[in-house]
Image: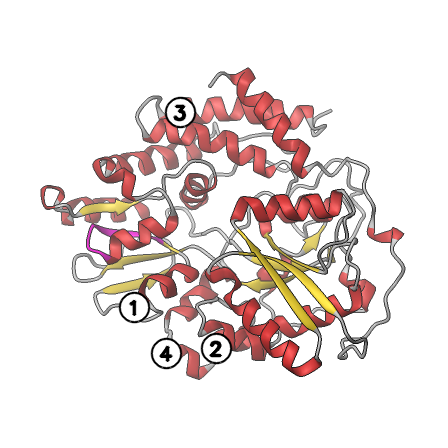
Amino acid sequence: MSHRTLFLCLCLFGLLVGTACQQAPTAADQPLIAPTAEVSTVTPLTLYIASRQGNISKGLVLAAERWEAQTGINIEIEEYAYTYLQEQIFIDVQRNTSKYDVILIDDPWFPSLAGNGYLVPLSAFSYAADPDFLQRSLELGMWPPPEGPRHPYLDPRKRSELYALPLVGNVQMFWYRNDLIDPPTDLTEMAAVLNEAADIPSGLYPYAYTGGAGNPVVTEFSAWNWAYGGEIFDQNWRVVLDQPASIRALTDMVSLAQTSLPASTLFRSSRDAGEAVLQGKAIASMIWPSHITELSQGQVPANMTITTFPGEVTSASQMGHWLLAVPVTAPHKQEAFNFIMWATSPEMMKAAVYEGVAPTRHSVFQDAELTSRYPWILTAEESIQNARWRPRTPEWPSVEYILGNYLNQALDGHITPEEALLSAKADIERLMEAAGYYD
């Protein structure tokens, strides 16, 4: 795909998610709502929730069932595939259809929604942040972002404010066959021991990398990049993928991945990669909490160890939280907030862990009953505490598309890692310049 064709595709994609400089209804246009989280007495009432299909929504479904029984309020959860859910949410808020009272959003969508004024700030309900939530998890629901570069149209004096609460504490972790390797101390050692222990002629590959186009491969690369001290942007939104740390990260990632290239069709998604390890086709991979339960019913085999992703200069993995928010177009804002308070309560988060949903509350991570049954949740909490989030910009979906395209070309051997990152840098900077990030 040519640079021009790629850029035009991204411009069309941007029409869907928008940018923070577009005109949109703002939270300030909405009247303040009575500060209460008590059960509504308005009946009959139906709340509509837009949610993701699959394991991610299991805790939400359970919360809805119990909320209906407790309050008499009907809950209708409409579950969609990932991309279609994103489309439905943006159509609802941009066209003011007032269909959904509560929306479940992947954290990369949050900057577009909060930045465009599509979400009701939780201060409208006089909500004070609960310290039981992990701080890193709470920060994903804040706008402007509490750290890192800010969108150039944002007032630098504007304080960060909560617009969403974290429901699902997904985060990258690392699992490996402890009967084949000892725990690696860093990525250099990891690559060496995995290659030594592999038996490729017998179908046992060193590492199941996540190589699917777009989000999967960028998520894989992000952990490697941060581990080597690399970044995508500096504090002025200039792309720094051409720095030695990032080039080394991708070079080492590609080198290890290409030893498993004959089985690359098995490793397109993070679930595929985790399943390959569980089935004895690879020694190690990234793993997400939602996939642990899905693949192994939460009971990790004795020959598997789950730990934090190895570092090099530092150790950091990527957060992939799902957040609950009230759109400004919601017909029943107060009742929607009441339900969010219930769905994210300690009681419901603990119940959701049994459904395979990772929590975001310290008390739930440390619950003795849960840690006895699912020891890996302690690793999940540690990983969240040290995790990074994707750059908080409404342009991230387009940035991810560009970067993923070149990462795939490097993994397939069509271009070198350095060529991939230099090309990505050029295209991303053109995108950011067109969006008004540079003077």
Q: Between disc 2 and disc 3, whose residue precedes?
A: 2
Q: Residue 255 placed where, x, y %?
A: 27, 34
Evaluate if marks 2 and 1 touch, with contact meaning CB atoms under 8 Å apart.
Answer: no
Q: Between disc 4 and disc 1, whose residue precedes?
A: 1
How packed is label 2: few (under 14 Cα within 10 Å), some, or many (20 or more)?
Answer: some
Q: CA distance from mark 2 to mark 1?
A: 18 Å
Q: Which disc number belongs to residue 366?
A: 2
Q: CA distance from mark 3 to mark 4?
A: 45 Å
Q: Where does the C terminus fall, quadrant-wise?
A: top right
Look at the image and give the residue range highlighted in magenta.
279-286
Q: Residue 153 placed where, x, y %?
A: 77, 36
Q: CA distance from mark 2 to mark 3?
A: 43 Å
Which residue appears farthest toward the left when viewing the image? 201
Of helix, strand and loop, which mostly describes the magenta segment? Answer: strand
Q: Nearer the viewer, residue 140 or 418?
A: 140
Helix, strand or loop at mark 3: helix
Q: Residue 79 placed where, x, y %?
A: 56, 57
Q: CA distance from mark 4 to mark 1?
A: 10 Å
Q: Between disc 2 and disc 4, whose residue precedes?
A: 2
Q: Between disc 3 and disc 1, whose residue precedes?
A: 1
**Residue kind at label 3, given as amino acid type:** Glu
Q: Between disc 3 and disc 4, whose residue precedes?
A: 4
